Image: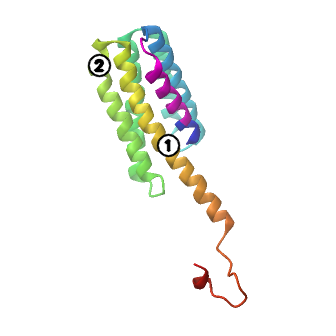
């Protein structure tokens, strides 16, 4: 999760600070973002491998087309598949991450649905939409990952021990 968050936040930062991106910047940044996201999804082992493959193909499509339309369609399809399967995963699972999967899926689907409407506005607009979705999901996944890490450390420490002989655990808490 933290790797996926880092990928999304780095991509989001690129989209914010690149003032006048060309179509080549759009294609390379979105393509590399989708490839890195694919690797992070694959490493998480939470979703089927086919999802990572589709997202990777979207990244390759963005790199190969080198056009506003090609990048928008490639990213739209990749994010739509990723988002829909995250929503399904969130609905099926009843674990601590179920809501995070749902939210991440809605963000990905929302980004995918918006991309075609901004194609005619060029690379800057497409990077803004894709980067906005990436930043929101990156913040979500970094909070989820850090929360899980904190909870794991707390659980590994075990229950609090009474501070004085004969003191009850309720007295300590």
Q: Residue at x 44, y 58 (%)?
A: 94
Task: Count the numbered circles shown.
Answer: 2
User: Is the residue 93 above or below the residue 59 in the image?
Assistant: below
What crowding class fits label 2: few (fewer than 14 Cα within 10 Å), some (14-19), or many (20 or more)? Answer: some
Depth order, front residue of 62/148: 148
Which circle marks residue 169 in the picture?
A: none
Left or right, 128 with respect to 141, comes to: left
Give the residues in magenta. Answer: 6-20
In this rendering, does residue 43 appear at all?
yes
Is 89 in front, or is 21?
Answer: 21
Q: Which of marks 1 and 2 is nearer the N terminus?
A: 2
Q: In which quarter of the image is the C terminus?
A: bottom right
Judged from the image, the secondary structure of the residue bearing numbered disc 2 is helix
Q: How far from the left and from the top, in percent, is residue 109? A: 34, 34
Quadrant occupied by the N terminus: top right
- Does residue 81 sit above or below 161 in this rendering? above
- The x, y position of residue 143, in whole percent, is 50, 47
Q: Could you say which is closer to the camera, residue 95 or residue 129?
A: 129
Circle 1: element type: helix
Residue 16 belongs to magenta span: yes
Q: Residue at x 46, y 28 (%)?
A: 12
- Label 1, on which residue? 141
What's the CA distance linking mark 1 and mark 2? 26 Å
State the residue position of label 2: 118
Q: Residue at x 32, y 23 (%)?
A: 115
Does the magenta portion include 128?
no
**Toward which corner of the image does residue 20 lie, by quadrant?**
top left
**Residue 74: percent from the left, percent from the top?**
41, 20
Assess disc 1: are there few (<14), some (14-19) or many (≥20) residues with their C-alpha within 10 Å of its C-alpha. Answer: many
Chief SS of the magenta region: helix
The answer to whether 43 appears left or right of 28 in the picture is right
């Amino acid at each position: 999760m933290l790797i996926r968050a880092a990928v999304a936040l780095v991509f989001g930062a690129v989209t914010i600070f690149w003032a006048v991106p060309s179509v080549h910047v759009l294609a390379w940044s979105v393509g590399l973002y989708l490839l890195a996201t694919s690797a992070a999804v694959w490493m998480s082992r939470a979703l089927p491998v086919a999802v990572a493959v589709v997202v990777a193909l979207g990244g390759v499509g963005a790199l190969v087309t080198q056009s506003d339309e090609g990048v928008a369609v490639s990213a739209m399809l990749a994010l739509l598949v990723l988002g829909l399967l995250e929503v399904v995963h969130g609905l099926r699972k009843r674990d601590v991450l179920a809501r995070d999967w749902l939210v991440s899926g809605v963000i990905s689907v929302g980004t995918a649905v918006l991309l075609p409407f901004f194609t005619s506005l060029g690379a800057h607009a497409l990077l803004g939409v894709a980067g906005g979705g990436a930043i929101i999901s990156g913040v979500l996944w970094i909070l989820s990952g850090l929360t899980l890490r904190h909870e794991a450390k707390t659980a590994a420490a075990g229950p609090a021990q009474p501070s004085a002989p004969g003191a009850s655990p309720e007295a300590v808490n």
